Structure formats: structure tokens, C-alpha cells
């Protein structure tokens, strides 16, 4: 047998692996950034503000003839202050027992805090028997001489199956971490088509891209009081998509901030979102934004159900 055929026969004996990797952690540790990097495109919005991710989002990476990794990006686990926060934390907790592999991502540039200890308890309670990988993210911000003590502090909270320093943005150990996750996935055929990268519709992604621009353009309480619904999403022609969306806020003062003087703020939000939505849908986009006040929607069970949080 020649060398080429020998390599082919060895490849045929490697089992194909497929499964779900739940990515959990407190807010702003880089969960969405890491998933987007692995998938190769933005399937979850990112911003410097905590609690950017509010829903469970799938990012699907298919490596031909090797594996399909279905990343489950989850909201940051935190102490909730309203019913929306409770729904977000519940979504994250539910992803723990459903996982084939748990990836707990922490911000290694900081010592563990109360939220980290809370997550360790949740893993002990809900993740028994599931391979646990501890990812010490933001390694580029941790001096080499501080790494042993920082790792030891997190390892006192859990006994992971594997752990590693990594940088989602700079690349340290990113490929190694992927190999480790794949090694713990079960032997399965792929669950999704090879070219599918998420379970979200274009309509849902468009709503999130609009909310991302709100997060990037506003400050203090405003970004956390906002949600977005896409009321109409229609192809007007082969080259133009029409989108009508509503930005929901809790108070009239927040509506005024979002509109801005002479409508400048809502125009900037619309322009930023439109550019990204055009990349998503592959056509020009006519985006019409309205701002509406729904008092205390984050504390209203009926509103949360209507918006898909329950």
C-alpha cells in the first residue's frame, strides 16, 4: 500500500464527533467573541457593556470529515435585579445539564469574585458527569509571573477535566482549546447542514444588530432598558430589503435620548445597523426605526413572553 492510501485508511478510522458545547460564564468574559471567532462570522452581537447576550444563541462550526461543534452561547450569569435578568440567568443555567461539554470561560485578568463562586456552585449542582473545560480567557492581560497564582485561585473553585489559558482575541491556545473540546464530544453524525452557522433567522439577527448599535451609542441605564422587535422584513426587489423595526424603552426620557437632537442619535444607530444588515442579507437595506415606550417592560411577565424571553 502506498503512503497516500495508508493516510486515507487511517483517516477513515477516526470517528466523526458531533455535539453541544455550552459556553457559560459571568458577563463580559468573552463568550460571544470566542464563539464568533470559531464560527468565522458574527452570529452573536458583542459590546463592551455587560449582559449584551440575552438569549441562547447557537454557533455551528463544521470541520469536514472530523467534527461538528455546536456552541451554545448563553447570557452572562449574574445577580438579577428584574424579571428579564431572571429569565437570562435561567436560560444560562438550563444550558448546563443539556451540554455534551461545558466550557466555563472566566476573565483571567481578574481574581475570582462572587459571580464566579456562584457559577462554580451551579456547575457542581447541574453539571455532574459532564466534561468541564475551564478557559482562562484574556490571557494577553495576565503577566506571566502572575499566571500560576491566578490559575490556582480558579482551580480552587472547581476541578475541571481540562483547563488552559487562552485569548479569544489574540489567539493564544485557541486552536488547542478547540481540539480539546472536540476530543470530549460524543461520536455522532452532524446535526446540522455543513453550511449552516447558526439557528437564528435573518430577521432575529437583524434585531440584534440594531440592539448592538444602541449598546455602542448609548450609556448609563439606556442600553439595558432597550429591546428591539422587527415588525416587517421584506424583499422589495432582488437588490433591496425593507425592514421596519421598533426600539422599545421604559421611559420617555430614554426615548428622547435615543432620538437625539434633530433625530441624530436614531439616525446614527440606523446607519450603523444598516451597514451590518446589508452584509448579512446581501442586498441594500432600507431600515425604518421607531422608538416606543413600554413602561417597566423588563419587570412585566406578559411583555417578556411577548418578546420571547419566556
Image: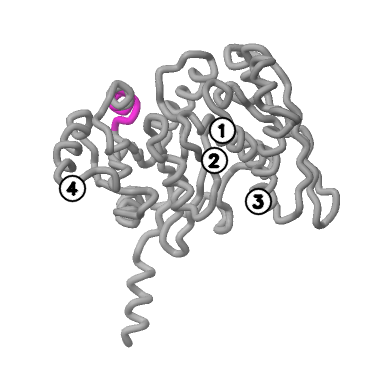
Asked if the residue under mark 1 is in contact with the one under mark 4, i.e. CB atoms within 8 Å, the reply is no
Say which element carries label 4: helix
Q: Is residue 201 in view?
A: no
In the image shown, does 171 or 305 lie closer to the viewer?
171
- Foreground label between 1 and 3: 1
Which residue is labeled 2 in the image?
Answer: 45
Say which element carries label 3: helix
Which residue is labeled 1 in the image?
Answer: 215
What's the distance in space between the residues labelled 1 and 2, CA to CA?
10 Å
Quarter of the rendering containing residue 201: top right
Q: Look at 38% across and 41% down and name the residue there.
A: 100
Asked if the residue under mark 2 is in contact with the one under mark 1, i.e. CB atoms within 8 Å, the reply is yes
Q: Is residue 284 in view?
A: yes
The answer to which of marks 2 and 4 sits earlier in the sequence is 2
Q: Is residue 91 left or right of residue 168?
A: right
Percent of width and height locating residue 23 = 40, 38
Percent of width and height locating residue 269 = 66, 37
- Which span is picked out in magenta? 120-128
Q: Which mark is residue 280?
A: 3
What's the distance in space between the residues labelled 1 and 3, CA to CA?
19 Å
Amino acid at each position: 500500500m502506498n503512503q497516500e492510501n495508508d493516510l486515507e485508511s487511517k483517516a477513515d478510522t477516526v470517528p466523526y464527533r458531533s455535539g453541544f458545547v455550552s459556553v457559560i460564564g459571568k458577563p463580559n468574559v468573552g463568550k460571544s467573541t470566542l464563539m464568533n471567532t470559531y464560527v468565522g462570522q458574527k452570529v452573536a452581537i458583542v459590546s463592551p457593556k455587560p449582559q449584551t447576550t440575552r438569549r441562547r444563541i447557537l454557533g455551528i462550526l463544521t470541520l469536514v470529515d472530523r467534527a461538528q461543534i455546536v456552541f451554545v452561547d448563553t447570557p452572562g450569569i449574574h445577580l438579577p435585579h428584574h424579571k428579564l435578568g431572571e429569565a437570562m440567568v435561567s436560560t444560562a443555567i438550563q444550558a448546563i445539564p443539556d451540554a455534551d461539554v461545558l466550557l466555563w470561560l472566566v476573565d483571567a485578568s481578574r481574581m475570582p469574585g462572587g459571580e464566579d463562586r456562584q457559577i462554580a456552585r451551579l456547575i457542581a449542582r447541574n453539571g455532574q458527569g459532564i466534561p468541564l473545560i475551564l478557559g482562562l480567557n484574556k490571557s494577553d492581560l495576565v503577566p506571566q509571573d502572575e499566571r500560576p497564582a491566578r490559575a490556582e485561585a480558579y482551580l480552587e473553585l472547581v476541578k475541571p477535566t481540562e483547563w488552559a489559558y487562552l485569548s479569544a482575541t489574540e489567539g493564544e491556545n485557541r486552536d488547542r482549546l478547540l481540539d480539546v473540546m472536540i476530543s470530549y464530544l460524543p461520536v455522532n453524525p452532524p446535526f446540522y447542514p455543513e453550511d449552516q452557522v447558526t439557528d437564528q433567522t435573518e430577521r432575529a439577527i437583524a434585531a440584534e444588530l440594531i440592539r448592538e448599535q444602541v449598546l455602542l451609542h448609548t450609556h448609563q441605564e439606556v442600553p439595558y432598558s432597550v429591546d428591539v422587535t422587527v415588525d416587517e422584513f421584506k424583499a422589495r426587489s432582488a437588490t433591496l430589503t425593507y425592514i421596519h423595526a421598533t426600539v422599545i424603552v421604559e421611559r420617555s426620557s430614554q426615548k428622547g435620548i435615543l432620538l437625539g437632537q434633530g433625530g441624530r442619535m436614531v439616525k446614527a444607530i440606523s446607519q450603523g445597523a444598516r451597514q451590518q444588515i446589508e452584509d448579512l442579507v446581501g442586498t441594500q437595506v432600507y431600515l425604518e426605526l421607531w422608538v416606543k415606550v413600554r413602561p417597566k417592560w423588563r419587570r412585566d411577565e406578559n411583555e417578556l413572553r411577548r418578546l420571547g424571553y419566556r
